[in-house]
Image (spheres, grey):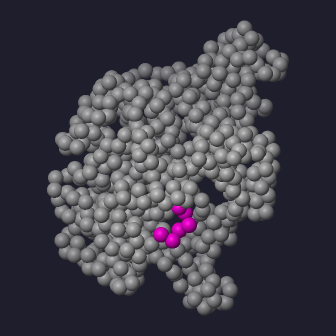
Amino acid sequence: MKRLPTALSTSPKSLPARGNSYIRLALDVPLQNLFEYALPEAIDARVGDRVAVRFGAQQKIGVVIEERVAPELAAERIKPISALREDAPRLSSDWIALMRFLSGYYQRPLGETVISSLPPRLRSTKPLPRKVLQAENTPPGARFLPNHTLTAMQEKVVERVTGGFNTFLLHGVTGSGKTEVYLHLAARTLERGMQALVLVPEISLTPQLEARFREAFPDARLALLHSGLEDIARTSAWLAAARGDAGVVLGTRLAVLAPMPRLGLVVVDEEHDTSFKQQEGLRYSARDAAVYRAKLAGCPVILGTATPSLETWHNWKLGRYERLELPERASPGARLPAVRTVDMRQEPPEQGFCKSLLSAVQERLAKREQSLIFINRRGYAPVLACEACGWTAGCERCTARMVLHAPDRRLHCHHCGGQAPIPRACPTCGNVDLKPMGRGTQRVEETLAARFPEARIVRIDRDSARHRAELTRTLEGIRRGEGDILVGTQLLAKGHDFPNLTLVGVLNADAALLSTDYRAGERLFSVLEQVAGRAGRRERPGEVLVQTRYPSHPLYAALVRHDFAGFAESQLDERRAAGFPPFVFEAALRAEAKKLDTAMRFLADAAALVEAPESVRVYDPAPHLITRRAGFERARLLMQSASRPALQDFLSRLTTGLFEASPRNVRWHLDVDPIEFD
């Protein structure tokens, strides 16, 4: 086992620059880009190195972006760098190119982009602990112990994916064995001495996939990267990826930013998932960054899903991506579940459940099979209301209702995290008989416990599974049959394999049909098809019951047929007619201020700051649907264009002006390719 040096190469401040040599550094300084520093004789810093520098009264970590530059400042005003940090590998030219792409496309300063892409410990001037600096020698290849023999369709897919850059849409139905394809492609990658990057949308999906990879590659080092890791673990995994010690890097969206010197394969599992879009700081799409990263590395990228995003489907239709199909389930005898709707107009629900669904659950209990009740709303009830005067419990800091949570008998705001006690009486009329309205996972669990007292009910949502270890134990118990009825949100909708689960019941699906968000239908079909796919993944047939007041809706008709292609084409026709993505490109300038007028005035001034070309349409400023969040009033300015280059050029000029003229009483950010408008 080798050790990397822990000491810094230091230079006294008085040393002159080496032959008048100057470099430009990326520093995490608000609204600024690159900074010039002199390179002393004693320090051999190159592009990609981390260095310590004096910035004002502080010591900061910077990354060398350019060397041997002609300075724009007078030589006497340029400070020398203080030290070269040798505790991490030099960042490659491909990694720097990725940072330049992200900075330019998402319109953020390069310094912020570079520094924020490093683990927190590597942004600090403090030395790394010794255990982080320890590197492991990893054999060039690794034994591959496949879990299953590939089906003919899987074998065809694996054979088609060859070396060189290409973007493949792996369109496989739920249970078709996409993970097995990933494993075989990773095996070929490791055999060539290359590294594989595998991205998943949620932290909750990493334990199962991690176990599959560790079982398949017992000799390979696997680096796990996600935001739930402690700093030391995250830094160790990042360094293992950057040194090339880790053959497989598995993680959420931030893993796409990890340096990998021998990148030979990129996999984006559940590519349609909105969790791949970062919603703060650098608002990048990890899926799109993964495609660009594979292009830089000259390797294939696999976008795997049962329900492709419409952007990905459109790219396939245009010939930019190649589609590989897995139309059947991989397990012998397994078939896609039968989906049918339950008309709530003909069969009025009692306490949220129609009789058909309760009877189906009872039937599974008698057969000792598992059922899943899906409702994408956590808490006990979404509204606490007074029937006498119509008052509802709202958040003081947000224009949103507070959700009643039963375990702690408190009201929670799911937007800002605020909490409040349940009032003893209506603050408006004094009525003491306040009623919970609607249903969340907690109330559904309570109803099922009363209806089936002998059943073992397991609820899984963000309230019941706050810790990764706890969630992992619960999911493993479900796979072993420790649970009769599962109640859950989207945490259970994707990626999980429960062999004994044969029934899925869906509550409250109609809410998305009434949304003003043009993406709501796409997201509803995706989540319903994904959660339906949890049923019948072995030889026992699966069934899905969707309670709805609109059983004839085209979305449900497509779901019953498992017809994603037909649904996608109809959605694209609607988007084309309405002028929505992917037929236009969008960006949203968002502003927050203590007063809505301030935010709206800022956006109006921004719209007039740069003249838009005819090919770019700038809409009038408008408040967000949830106007106030966490005490700030929010508004947005939407911009569209059928030309991506024209929009990017306009955004570049706009952000330059905004960075120079931004007032202190407004917080703003630009969201390129936005996916949220609440």
Residue plotted at (61% across, 77% down) = 393
Where is residue 371? Give x, y as percent. Answer: 29, 68
Residue at 43%, 27% (x, y): give it: 298
Q: Is residue 609 left or right of residue 471?
A: right
Q: Position of residue 335 (x, y in %)?
A: 21, 59
Q: Quadrant of the C terminus?
A: bottom right
Q: Nearer the viewer, residue 21 or 220?
A: 21
Image location of residue 595, percent across then percent down: 77, 63
User: With respect to residue 283, does 10 lie above or below?
Assistant: above
Of 520 and 148, nearer the camera is 520
In-image side of 140 versus 128 (left or right): left
Does residue 163 appear in this view? yes
Query: Which residue occupies the foreground of this view, 270 or 246?
Result: 270
- Work out which quarter of the rendered image holds the N terminus and state it: top left
User: Can you give x and y, in whole percent of width and height, for residue 282 in the image?
Assistant: 61, 43
Task: Please report the bounds of the magenta region as a residue range.
Answer: 513-519
Rendered view: 187 above or below 665: above
Prevailing secondary structure class for the magenta stretch in the rendered image? loop
Q: Is residue 468 left or right of residue 109?
A: left
Tell me if residue 119 is in the magenta stretch.
no
Please indicate, yes or no, whether residue 478 appears anywhere in the rendered image.
no
